Image (cartoon, grey):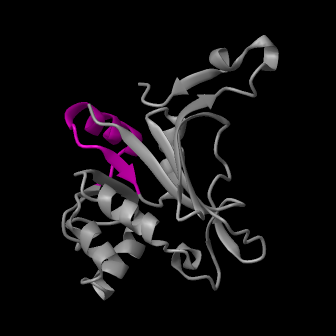
Amino acid sequence: MASLTVDFITSLDGYGAAEGWPGFWGMEVPEYLAWIAKNAEHGHVVLMGARTYRLMSGFAAEAPDDPGTAELTATPKVVFSSTLEAPLSWDNTELVAGDAVAAVQDMKRRDSRPLRTVGSLSLCRSLLEAGVVDRFRVVVFPVITGATGRERIFDAYPDIALDLVDSRTFDGRLQLLEYVPTVLEGPPGAGGRDTADAGLRRGGAR
């Protein structure tokens, strides 16, 4: 059975990008880039929504020989969208127009390859709410972009308890945190319930 990891990169204050800042906030440290390249070799399937597909496929078309986009082009990808039309122009990309949660549950049952998201905030939120996410992984960049930040990652997310299962630091600057998520019905202890009672949809639950 496949595992599903939601991947985000974020500023310390929870933004996915910032106006006027370069990609990765200008902090593409060698150790982090090497970790990305190593993970690209693990034969996973990338999941994304329509907006992320348009953005990333545009990058790939403009710079097909860039190592990062070339690796993503070669990687199997599944796009969930009711607005895009098949066939999609980006190589190795499948379009799914139906319910994303049901489709991912089916993929987890029938495929052994790991599943990972790229961007796609609303898709990730839906998958987390449904309790089908096994790992929640965040790379935190040491910047606060309160004035220029855009794409706040966690707005409208449910309450989620996170059990830390892995962590590391890249080049003494970037911090990777990997968790098992548990979606909560409410704050731990509310109404006499503890965290175990409130957490109904743990990562990987059906």
Residue drawn at point x = 46 percent, y = 48 percent: 6
Between 70 and 157, the one nearer to me in the picture: 70
Residue 147 vertical placement versus 122 (above, below): below
Does the stretch in magenta take in 91? Answer: no
Between 106 and 21, the one nearer to me in the picture: 21
- Count of marks overlaid on the render: 0
Residue drawn at point x = 49 percent, y = 49 percent: 124
Residue 177 vertical placement versus 81 (above, below): above
Does the stretch in magenta take in 115? Answer: yes
Please state if 182 lies on the left or on the right of 69 as rendered.
right
Quick check: can you spot residue 133? no
- Residue 56: image quadrant is bottom left
* Start-end of magenta stretch: 96-117
Residue found at the very far front of the displayed protein: 172
The N terminus is located in which quarter? top left
Residue found at the very far top of the displayed protein: 192
Residue drawn at point x = 52 percent, y = 27 percent: 202
Spot occupied by residue 123 in the image (x, y as percentages of width and height) = 47, 51
Quick check: can you spot residue 47? yes
Residue 179 vertical placement versus 189 (above, below): below
Between 70 and 199, the one nearer to me in the picture: 70
Please state if 85 lies on the left or on the right of 205 as rendered.
left
Residue drawn at point x = 68 percent, y = 20 percent: 195
Please state if 204 lies on the left or on the right of 182 as rendered.
left
Spot occupied by residue 148 in the image (x, y as percentages of width and height) = 72, 77
Spot occupied by residue 24 in the image (x, y as percentages of width and height) = 53, 73
The C terminus is located in which quarter? top left
